[in-house]
Amino acid sequence: MPDSPTPGRRERKKAATRQAIADAALELFLEHGFDRVSVRDVAERADVSTTTLFAHFPSKEALVFDREEEVDAALAAAVRERPEGQGVVEALRAHALKSWVPIVTDPRRESFTALVNGTPALREYGERMWMRHADALGTVIAEELGREPDDPACAALARFVLEVPALTAGRHDPRATVETVFDLLLNGWR
Amino acid sequence: MPDSPTPGRRERKKAATRQAIADAALELFLEHGFDRVSVRDVAERADVSTTTLFAHFPSKEALVFDREEEVDAALAAAVRERPEGQGVVEALRAHALKSWVPIVTDPRRESFTALVNGTPALREYGERMWMRHADALGTVIAEELGREPDDPACAALARFVLEVPALTAGRHDPRATVETVFDLLLNGWR
DNA sequence: TCACTAACTGGAACAGTTGCAGTTTCTTAC
DNA sequence: GTAAGAAACTGCAACTGTTCCAGTTAGTGA
């Protein structure tokens, strides 16, 4: 949060435009379905040109996944600022339970989750974006453990941890699944 | 190999057309880069209409990943037909070392690998296609161990194993990476 | 040989995305 | 306060992947 003190009119208007586009998109997608709404429709509803829309979002799918920064930072923090003596895996388990599970199970997000899971393009885009954090997380883990930045075991751990949300998707008990998967990561197969 | 005995002229021609398209695509992609070649170019070179091209391949990316069947079958076989007393993880490790590593390290594939790894769209498409085998593999593992077909630990193991190729991409010693990752899967994180 | 049908064709159309030239609106330095 | 400069926005045309459609060609099987 570096720029709380009134970012100037221009930046405020820009943010407002972006928000208007995202809102229009979500509204239309939830009402008619992602595939039956064109980006021109979204732009129309938000009262901007499609050119402007693409100046704010790199793709149609990105309209749905607004606000996904801070993830890198949150992951890094979870690892770096873990309690004295706690292992990396345990720290990530705690982070998953505290930060991811509530999101998945939040009833207010139900329609949103249904939209994403019900649209292959969105689901895949979401997972792809999500997996982009793997490099950063792997590097942080390696750093924390004093290994080479591209240590294969650290890279593997990072990718495996990031698979967790995909593994919980559509299950009745996400919490239990998270526990199971982290047990596997910690203790190995058997 | 169910239809070796002369599949008839029609089927042979169809296969030839498909092959011509795939060949033309690879040739052009290797020469100019994936993004600088349009599907119309490919169709032109293969001397077919773009309509025909899309009758054989579901997307532009699919032109590159020809022939990727048998993967499900090979994975299932690796698990099911493992030696008496060998664990599932060890069986998959052996399969990875025997079947995947040689492909990645084959010098004849160098330019192909460079094309895929150098084109984000292709790399992501490849990984996505690859991950589609996760459900099947997870089910086979569960079955082999007498668990529920959607057992979370089995699903997790399947996804993790399928991440291995992605984890070896671009590393100087794929074999060592495979070993490291499977050690992690078998023994857990310390 | 003849009907049947799968493969192929050409072209139009649609949707996502980008480029471009020009306009509006905010910012900043005078 | 004003003028230069930059950023955001506009409208439109173009390109690309993909699909649709109506028709042609060429194996197939009776």
Image: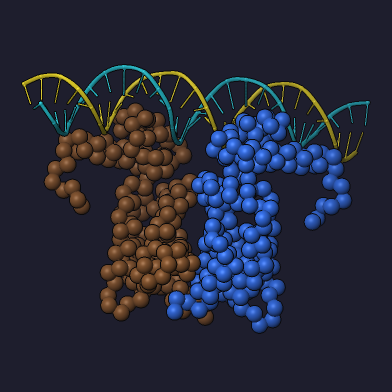
Chain colours: A brown, B blue, C cyan, D yellow
User: Is residue A24 visible in this depiction of the protein?
Assistant: no
Quarter of the picture containing the N terminus of chain B is: bottom right
Q: Which residue is pictured at 60% across the width and 62% down the height?
A: B136
Q: Which residue is pictured at 31% across the width and 49% down the height?
A: A67
Q: Which residue is pictured at 14% across the width and 43% down the height?
A: A6
In the depicted view, which residue is nearer to us: B62 or D29? B62
Quarter of the picture containing the C terminus of chain B is: bottom left
In the depicted view, which residue is nearer to us: B59 or B20? B20
Q: Is residue B164 left or right of residue A6?
A: right
Q: Which residue is pictured at 54% across the width and 38% down the height?
A: B35
The correct choice, above or below, for A14 with respect to B69 in the image is above
Indicate the quadrant where residue B77 lies.
bottom right
Where residue A190 appears, as percent x and y from the top left, is 52, 80
User: Is residue B180 visible in this depiction of the protein?
Assistant: yes
In the depicted view, which residue is nearer to us: A60 or D4? D4
Where residue B4 appears, as percent x and y from the top left, is 84, 52
Q: Is residue B153 left or right of residue B110?
A: left
Indicate the quadrant where residue A176 lies.
bottom left
Q: Is residue B160 left or right of residue A177?
A: right
Indicate the quadrant where residue A57 lies.
top left
Where residue B66 appears, as percent x and y from the top left, is 67, 48
Q: Is residue B62 left or right of residue A114?
A: right
Where residue B140 appears, as percent x and y from the top left, is 62, 68
Tally the marks. Answer: 0
